[in-house]
Image: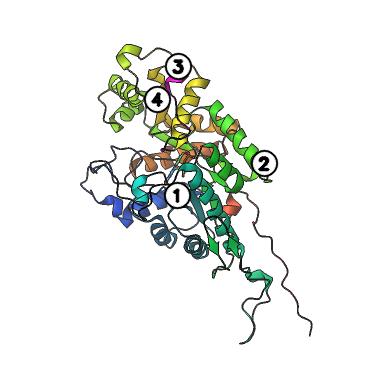
């Protein structure tokens, strides 16, 4: 639910509310709609730097922790996916803030760990340039490890409840220092926030380089990704599960929720026109030319109906931009014979595009889910609020009718809703002999 929506053309607002991106009411309306549609969570991506292009739609302005704290007080049940950088935060501060919100919200916090790839962010936090990817991921791994140790470090269940003044609130067993000394951090602990309603927040991860998948395999409960084809999604899922196993984890404990951009209209033709308009194009030819230009291809030379060569969609393991978005296009073109005309309708802004009537969109959503390739999706409405409203009104009932989507919130925390086990099983408090 970033800003005015996923589409670059969702801005400016036809009603003249050009400052909607900093309006609490705007996000409140979006979160309430998502709640009405029984979404598991709402999600904010984040970059702590002013966007470089002044004429682009506003993005990543309000701090996700602050915004979600306010929303948690107004919208029940729904979870909050908070993006926060492991390169430009301190583990103790972040662990404390997220654990605090987890208490306040009743166990509804998911932390999306990002290592940050934008040099403009680096420049806001010191004079050192953005470290190379390998270093950022080493730091991310240690950062998450420290945060988890801190989250586990004070367990109220491991001590008898104080009954009178002078009884201890904690002891050496219930609140132990973590004494962490690593490459990047030295942290004594324990944290001054105890385990919460769901133990501690879930962890989400979106990096898709080898190091990113390794981080996910080690720590992630939820993985957000750019996956454009069913086979590519299956391959990615297998890689992720293999990494989880390599780290001694149960692969059943990871939920894969790739991005999905739905464009829904009364007819397929109307949905296609809307797709073109959302990109500022006059028609399909214009859209195809723009897609070709984006990948450095010549639409006139190639022709819209020539099958594409995967080699035309290379990516560099050392590139600064996230690998997930470039690799996903290459994987799609390698797995299926696709023309430029077809490719233009398969991806939007780096994520899987589904265009059509509500029935067609629901069928495409269910197809991957029924095949066991994904556990769900991260829905990215092109225009907030409009496309979320249409999705909740027209698509969600079809998903419910298919038995793929709930009608209420039977489980109180996001951890229990995702069917994930308690991260810290309770130990009986020590009974002192008298
Ligand atoms: C789908 C997706 C969403 C992402 N969202 C963010 C974000 O909100 N903020 C951010 O700093 N990085 C974001 N990233 C970047 C990665 O999480 C990661 O920290 C880094 O860029 C390296 O990614 P890589 O392993 O794919 O190369 C995103 C990446 C993907 C694939």
- On residue 115, the disc is none
Which-is-in-front pick, marks 2 and 1?
A: 2
Read off the residue under disc 1: 42
Q: How many marks?
A: 4
- Whether residue 412 can be seen here: no
Residue 246 badge: 2
Q: Which mark is residue 309?
A: 3
Q: Main secondary structure of the magenta part?
A: loop
319 inside magenta stretch: yes
Label 4: which secondary element: loop
Q: Which mark is residue 345?
A: 4
Q: Give coordinates of residue 348: x percent, y percent.
A: 39, 32
Q: Is residue 337 a member of the stretch shown in magenta? A: no
- Frontmost of labels 2 and 4 is 2
| Magenta range | 311-321
* Residue found 28% across the figure and 43% down from its top: 57
- Of callouts 3 and 4, which one flags the residue occurring earlier in the amino acid sequence? 3
């Amino acid at each position: 639910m970033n800003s005015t929506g996923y589409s670059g053309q969702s801005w400016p607002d036809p009603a003249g509310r050009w400052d909607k991106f900093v309006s609490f009411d705007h996000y409140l309306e979006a979160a309430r709609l998502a709640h009405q549609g029984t979404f598991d969570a709402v999600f904010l991506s984040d970059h702590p730097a002013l966007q470089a292009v002044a004429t682009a739609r506003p993005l990543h302005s309000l701090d996700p922790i602050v915004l979600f704290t306010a929303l948690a007080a107004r919208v029940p049940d729904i979870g909050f996916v908070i993006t926060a950088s492991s390169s430009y935060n301190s583990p103790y501060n972040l662990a404390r803030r997220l654990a605090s919100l987890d208490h306040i919200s009743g166990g509804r916090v998911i932390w999306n760990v990002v290592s940050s790839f934008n040099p403009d962010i680096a420049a806001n936090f010191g004079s050192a340039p953005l470290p190379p990817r390998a270093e950022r991921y080493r730091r991310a791994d240690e950062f998450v490890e420290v945060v988890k140790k801190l989250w586990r470090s004070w367990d109220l269940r491991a001590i008898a409840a104080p009954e009178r003044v002078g009884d201890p609130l904690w002891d050496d067993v219930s609140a132990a220092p973590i004494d962490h000394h690593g490459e990047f951090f030295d942290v004594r602990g324990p944290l001054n926030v105890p385990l919460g309603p769901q133990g501690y927040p879930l962890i989400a991860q979106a990096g898709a380089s080898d190091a990113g998948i390794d981080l996910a395999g080690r720590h992630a409960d939820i993985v957000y990704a750019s996956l454009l084809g069913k086979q590519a999604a299956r391959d990615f899922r297998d890689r992720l599960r293999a990494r989880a196993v390599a780290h001694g984890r149960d692969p059943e404990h990871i939920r894969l929720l790739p991005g999905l951009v739905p464009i829904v209209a009364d007819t397929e033709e109307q949905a296609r026109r809307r797709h073109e308009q959302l990109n500022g194009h006059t028609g399909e030819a214009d859209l195809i030319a723009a897609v070709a230009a984006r990948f450095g291809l010549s639409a006139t030379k190639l022709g819209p109906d020539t099958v594409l060569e995967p080699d035309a969609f290379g990516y560099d393991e050392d590139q600064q931009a996230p690998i997930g978005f470039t690799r996903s296009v290459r994987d799609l073109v390698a797995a299926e014979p696709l023309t430029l005309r077809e490719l233009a309708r398969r991806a939007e802004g780096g994520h899987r595009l589904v265009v059509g009537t509500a029935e067609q969109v629901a069928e495409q959503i269910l197809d991957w889910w029924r095949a066991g390739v994904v556990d769900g999706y991260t829905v990215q409405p092109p225009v907030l609020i409009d496309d979320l409203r249409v999705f909740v009104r027209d698509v969600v009932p079809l998903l419910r009718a298919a038995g793929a989507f709930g009608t209420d919130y039977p489980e109180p925390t996001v951890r229990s809703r995702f069917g994930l086990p308690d991260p810290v099983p309770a130990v009986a408090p020590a009974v002192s002999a008298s």
